[in-house]
Amino acid sequence: MRSGTDPVRHLYVHVPFCAHKCDYCAFYSAPPSGDQVNRYVDAVVRELELVAPRCRPETIFFGGGTPSLLTLKQWETLLEAMRRLNLLGAREFSVECNPATVSADKAKLLRSAGVTRISMGVQSLDPSLLERLGRIHTREMVFRSLDILRGAGFDGVSIDLMFAIPGQTMDLWQRTLDEALALGTDHLSCYEVIYEEDTPLFEQLAAGEFDVDEDLACAQYDALVDRAGEAGFRQYEVANWARDVRMGAPALPKEQVEELPRFACRHNVAYWRGKDFFGCGPSASEYVDGLRSRNWANTNLYCDQLDKGRRAKEFAEALGPLARAGELAAFGLRMNAGWPFAEFKERTGFDLREEWADDLAMLEKCGWGERLEDRFRLTRLGLRFADSAAERVLRPDAKPENRLVLEPV
Ligand code: SF4
């Protein structure tokens, strides 16, 4: 476990701009207005200056929003600041891209600054479903972007897909899946559409414009698990798959196969294993030294605070030890590897087999979980219902006074 004097090894930066809001999206992002993006870039640089003395990142993740919406000049400013602050050189550096905003000069700049992975929000390769989701890109843009990224030297590309989209038949899902798996990328994230309040999709559902077909969603997830496995991907979390070798290369000898696939996203694994991370940018969360906090989800307010030389925290809270352990139990069980008992004890101070004995027994009884000699993990069926399994192992804190709401100055 990290001691208070060790540097924090993981850094997230949120870019809160999107050209157009997708119909299902509840992330904090908005179309940029006026000079707001330049002001944001200056503010993020200031926030990075504040965290840099305590941060030596092994993984960096720029998410959003649409980080690829930043111009070449804005990226140069950010990367130059990171160089000056000794924040570059991470083993893994990911940037999320929208296929409509990838360009050769930006791709080259990112690659030359040490970005190792691009995570591309594809969601579907079916034109009518892309339109249904309110996406701004076309399927042709996906292929073109991949060519550009590979031309710039990116071998590490991940694509995001969605299933259970209204109107997405099993046949349409399988066609997208097969095409996506044949693209030769080394990482795949697949999410079931969820209906978040205050999104157009939620309102359409509430107005009865379509029904949710849970059985179809389950069948689509099953098809995903089967097909990704057949195509050489290994699942390592409920929604994430990665290869051990590039497509077409000979398989790794058995003794070299590790618990995590070689091209797994180490940054996300750090979240699921409860590592400390800094979060910069509007709405970004962070967890450092037992304190969880979040920045204001308001770009102007965020910039105002950084102008005054302070971080833009909306709240900070210290969870009690059992509440934090319950949260980690829930996160870690999302991974196929589950929780090794020894690692869980080392990270939280609690023994999963004792504090959660009844929950583990119940999960085993309904076929959602299995106990191995050294760990507990969810089964294939359990992973499908990981959110419900997670609810079972949470231990919410009974002390809300641990939460400190911070007023902007
Ligand atoms: S591009 Fe991503 S972050 Fe932006 S609106 Fe769409 S889903 Fe949300």
Image (spheres, rainbow, N blue to C red):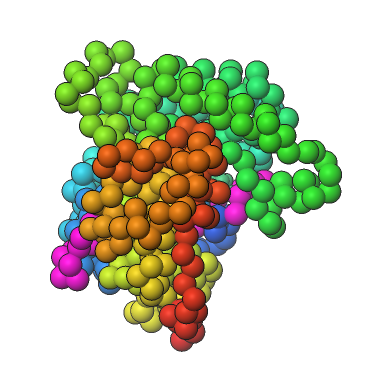
Name the image quarter holding residue 255.
top left
Asked if one can make out residue 253 in the rendered structure from this viewpoint, the answer is: yes
- What is the x, y in percent for residue 383? 48, 38
**276 versus 20 height, above or below:** below
Which residue occupies 76% across, 51% down? 203
Residue at the limit of the structure toward the bottom, as seen here: 409
Residue 18 forms part of the magenta stretch? yes
Q: Is residue 49 left or right of residue 398?
A: left
Question: Which residue is at the front of the view, 151 or 330?
Answer: 330
Number of marks drawn: 0
> In the visual, does 60 lie left or right of 293?
left
Residue range (magenta): 1-26
- Position in image of residue 191 (x %, y %): 54, 38
**Residue at image point 58% right, 18% down:** 175
**Residue closer to the observer: 75 or 210:** 210
Looking at the rendering, in which quadrant would you find the N terminus? bottom left
141 and 345: which is toward the camera: 345
Q: Is residue 278 above or below residue 131?
A: below
Q: Look at the image and tell me whether residue 37 can be seen.
A: no
Overall secondary structure of the magenta section? loop
In the rendered image, residue 238, in percent from the top left (x then y), is placed at 46, 39
Specify whether 42 is left or right of 89: right
| Placement of 59 over or under 370, stated as above or below | below
Along the horizontal axis of the image, is 22 left or right of 310?
Answer: right
Residue appearing at x 71%, y 46% in the figure: 201
**Coordinates of residue 18 in the picture (x, y in percent):** 55, 50
**Does 184 lie within the magenta span?**
no
- Residue at image location 47% in from the left, 83% down from the top: 401
